[in-house]
Image (cartoon, helix red, strand yellow):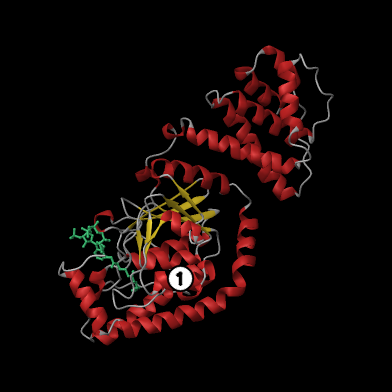
């Protein structure tokens, strides 16, 4: 360990600094499991740091201070004299960490190195997406890397509109152990998202992300879903769509790991309403949030009739859900629907740096925290989901809805 730290410093610091960085092996005071995980991350950060470009003196001092705090605890050496400038700067940085616990310092060190790695030359180490892509999905690109499973809606030419499974044989069964393979997966997006969530809930990733490919996050329900009427008639179509909708939203209610929406562009309809079931929502400054249900002769879904008033208050929720007011990313953030907005030019870089750091947190602790936050609402959310789905089943049979959809499909109307 001391050698690793020494090598880091040799690249950056003049010889006068080296001696003070030859530190003893880690002394950790945590449970065995946590200790193993954390020490491994820390050791990998120590070797990663050697490959970094010079990050500048300020960052080097931060790394030094966190390293000392993580390995020795609070600053315990006499303050260097005023003319010993370098050692005084180092002492000041370490001393400024006060009584920060060793394990927090270790985690901060790992986070800092992770942020530096991805913002320096990490692009050369990233495998092309095609190599990491999980097979079996036609409307999604699903990848797993860095303990993050990313589910990307992939119909950019159709603004990632979400299609229904209609003619295929296989259908998602909430209680089945069905998992996707190349040959038997249905191609439509509602089902594929459910399958991808189900697989992500069981894989070894720590967090799961939903995002969109192209300029849109998603334009919501694909309105051509309404044109595929089975021989049994339109009532049967409305009924099976309501069941599909309820199953789809239940998957989000029940998802056991931290679920993050990376909203890369405008979001419409159901892609907005389910955001209330996510744990974190990051938005590009270009994103907008639009729920034009009345315009479409429809009513809210995705548990938004409950989550939106809770998140933003009934008055703001009514403006969105009844009157279809479109929010900018900044407005959605101010109203609590969005966690944080990033400038579009740096959106991907900033968000993924943040998520990579979060994905290194202990996964079981994150799961339990989510359970504690969400579990007591689950039954209520399921009941609300069922009620919203029933209301929509009727709406889909109304003239108001039929006319609105026909107007879009015959190019007479657009949002
Ligand atoms: C199991 C069923 C559950 C249902 C749950 C209930 C869900 C409700 C909702 O989600 S309501 C929201 C429905 N969405 C919309 O009403 C959006 C409709 N689309 C638009 O108004 C516009 O396309 C736009 C504003 C999103 C983008 O406009 P623009 O930038 O001018 O692009 P284009 O219109 O040219 O779009 C390109 C291409 O994509 C097709 N497309 C876009 N969105 C949808 C959609 N939601 N459904 C079907 N197709 C869509 C559009 O037709 C164009 O296709 P083309 O190139 O002409 O083939």
Q: Quadrant of residue 318?
A: bottom left
Residue hosting label 1: 317
Q: Is residue 272 visible?
A: yes
Q: In what quadrant of the picture does the N terminus appear? A: top right
Q: Is residue 204 visible?
A: no
Local packing at callout 1 (Cα closer than 10 Å; few below 14, some 14-19, many 20+) is many
Determine whether, in the image, residue 73 is placed left or right of residue 61: right
Determine the residue positioned at 64% across, 36% down. Answer: 109
Residue 114 or 277: which is nearer the viewer? Answer: 277
Q: Secondary structure at mark 1?
A: helix
- Ligand 1 found in image quarter: bottom left
Determine the residue positioned at 40% across, 80% down. Answer: 389
Give above or below for 13 relative to 122: above
Q: Quadrant of residue 247?
A: bottom left
Locate residue 70, reporting x and y percent.
Answer: 73, 36
Q: Quadrant of residue 394?
A: bottom left
């Amino acid at each position: 360990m001391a050698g690793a730290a020494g090598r880091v410093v040799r690249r950056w610091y003049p010889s006068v600094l080296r001696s003070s960085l030859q530190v003893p092996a880690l002394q950790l005071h945590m449970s065995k499991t946590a200790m193993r995980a954390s020490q491994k991350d820390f050791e990998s950060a120590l070797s990663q740091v050697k490959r970094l470009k010079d990050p500048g003196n300020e960052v080097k001092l931060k790394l030094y201070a966190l390293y000392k705090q993580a390995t020795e605890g609070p600053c315990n050496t006499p303050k260097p004299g005023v003319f010993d400038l370098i050692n005084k700067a180092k002492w000041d940085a370490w001393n400024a960490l006060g009584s920060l616990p060793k394990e927090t310092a270790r985690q901060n060190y790992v986070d800092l190195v992770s942020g530096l790695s991805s913002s320096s030359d990490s692009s050369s180490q990233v495998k092309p997406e095609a190599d990491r892509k999980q097979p079996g999905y036609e409307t999604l690109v699903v990848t797993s890397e860095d303990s993050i499973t990313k589910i990307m809606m992939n119909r950019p030419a159709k603004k990632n509109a979400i299609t229904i499974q209609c003619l295929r044989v296989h259908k998602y069964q909430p209680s089945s152990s069905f998992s996707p393979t190349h040959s038997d997966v249905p191609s439509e997006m509602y089902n594929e998202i459910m399958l991808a969530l189900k697989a992500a809930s069981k894989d070894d990733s720590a967090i799961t992300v939903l995002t969109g490919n192209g300029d849109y996050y998603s334009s919501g329900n694909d309105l051509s879903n309404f044109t595929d009427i089975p021989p049994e008639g339109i009532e049967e179509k409305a009924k099976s769509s309501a069941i599909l909708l309820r199953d789809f939203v239940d998957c989000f209610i029940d998802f056991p790991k931290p679920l993050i929406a990376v909203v890369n562009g405008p979001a419409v309809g159901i892609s907005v309403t389910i955001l209330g079931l996510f744990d974190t929502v990051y938005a590009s400054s270009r994103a907008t949030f639009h729920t034009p249900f009345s315009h479409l002769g429809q009513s809210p879904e995705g548990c938004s009739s409950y989550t939106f008033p809770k998140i933003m208050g009934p008055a703001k929720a009514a403006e969105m859900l009844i009157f279809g007011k479109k929010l900018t990313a900044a407005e959605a953030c101010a109203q609590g629907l969005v966690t944080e907005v990033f400038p579009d030019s740096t959106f991907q870089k900033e968000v993924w740096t943040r998520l990579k750091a979060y994905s290194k947190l202990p996964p079981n602790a994150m799961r339990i925290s989510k359970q504690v936050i969400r579990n007591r609402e689950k039954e209520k959310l399921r009941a609300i989901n069922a009620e919203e789905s029933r209301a929509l089943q009727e709406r889909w049979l109304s003239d108001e809805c039929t006319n609105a959809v026909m107007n879009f499909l015959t190019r007479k109307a657009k949002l």
